[in-house]
Amino acid sequence: MQENSSAWGTAVKSLEEAAKLANLNQDVLNILKEHQRIFITTFSVRMDDGSLKIFKGYRVHHNHALGPIRGGTRFHKEETLDDMKALSLWMTVKNALNGIPAGGGKGGVVCDPEAMSEGELQRLCRAYIRAIAPVIGSWIDFPGADVGTSSKTMSWMMDEWEQMHAMTHEPTAISGKEIVIGGSEGRPAATGYGVCLTVRETCKALGLDINQQRVAIQGFGKVGSWAARLIFDMGAKIVAVGDVFSGVTNENGINPYELLEHVEKTGKVQGFAGTSPITNEELLTCECDVLIPAATQSVITADNAAKVTAKIVVEGANGPTTTEAEKILASKGVFLIPDILANGGGTTIAHLERVQCLCDDFWTEEQVNNRYEGMFIKACQEVFDIAKKENISIRMAAWVKALRIVEKAIVARGWV
């Protein structure tokens, strides 16, 4: 079965469907179907062997009605403008849904950070910031970390920004930094923590015992590895885990802490003691109660959705389920928690990092997590209530809640 599984195509379909359910003003919808700024740049970096390499970078601003642009930075060899457009729209919705006074944006560089030395990567970060300088800043757009970037890369970016501005200290210009220079406690686990809370709250809403749930996680990077550990700590059984190469399974359970040690030694989940090999495609349809796609976009499609055995799907990645696949899952009675709700921990704690930097008052990890948990539970309960009251899916309820907030901001500004 063929379908348009591009990230932007999926995002627009969700927007249009939710706009109807939210009775969104047509002019507002037209505004949200366009991006307010798309910045594409090329820049050069001197490599260790003396050669000069040209890179392409992006910074996309979807909509700033609610406040300055907030969104991550991706370094990936297959990054595209289509991805940036979709991710920036999702960030607008995600920020509104989670009560963050910021618009949505996304940026990135087409590169393979794994193939670069630390010196090359630092030069790339600094060159990228110089290239996108016209469209970023503390009260314009404060980039954060995402796929292929880290607290180290974001710290280099912030330093470059401050160097460009005569050493003015501006910790609000970049989020996801090292704690010692203005980063926030709780940031490394942020998105995974949000996924974990999603599983917990969904089990509560459905009257399920989390200790009886078998969980499969596709993706064992920043999001998946933290989600696995935290969900394991809550008592659930991890029965399958995959990474970019392949996956492993054990119906009796996998200890994610021990698996992480294995990955740190070998670079992959494959070969972990006591497990059997499994492909990522097989992982998506393996026997489990909760499936967490936490890798990339469009992995659950019309071709495999009917084979999904999980009763709960929690989208740890952005856009892992295509529109057609979601219809199939719904027909099977699968309870799907959308990305904009499930993986909002990263953007929420980036917002809390900004608040701390603005106040020059930094909190403990417990304080950060308590603040985030309160925000998440409030958003989650409101979404579940809208879904029940208006008899719509959880994804559409999340979009409806967010779009109504964005619409109020657009109307208040007199844009329509």
Image (tube, rainbow, N blue to C red):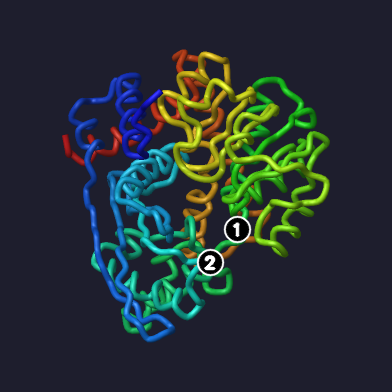
Percent of width and height locating residue 13: 33, 28
286 displayed left or right of 15: right
Q: Nearer the viewer, residue 262 or 171?
A: 262
Residue 188 tag number:
1
- Compared with 308, 217 (above or below) is below
Residue 271 horizontal side relative to residue 297, left or right: right
Q: Are marks 1 and 2 in contact (CB under 8 Å)?
A: yes
Count of numbered circles on the image: 2
Quadrant into which the N terminus falls:
top left
Label 2: few (<14), some (14–19) or many (≥20) C-alpha neighbours in 10 Å: some
Q: Residue at x 40, y 80 (%)?
A: 47
Q: Residue at x 45, y 41 (%)?
A: 297
Disc 2: which residue = 151
x, y percent for residue 239:
74, 37
Q: Secondary structure at mark 1?
A: loop
Q: Specify the quadrant that holds the C terminus.
A: top left
Residue type, label 1: Pro
Secondary element at image label 2: helix
Residue 241 percent coordinates (x, y): 68, 43
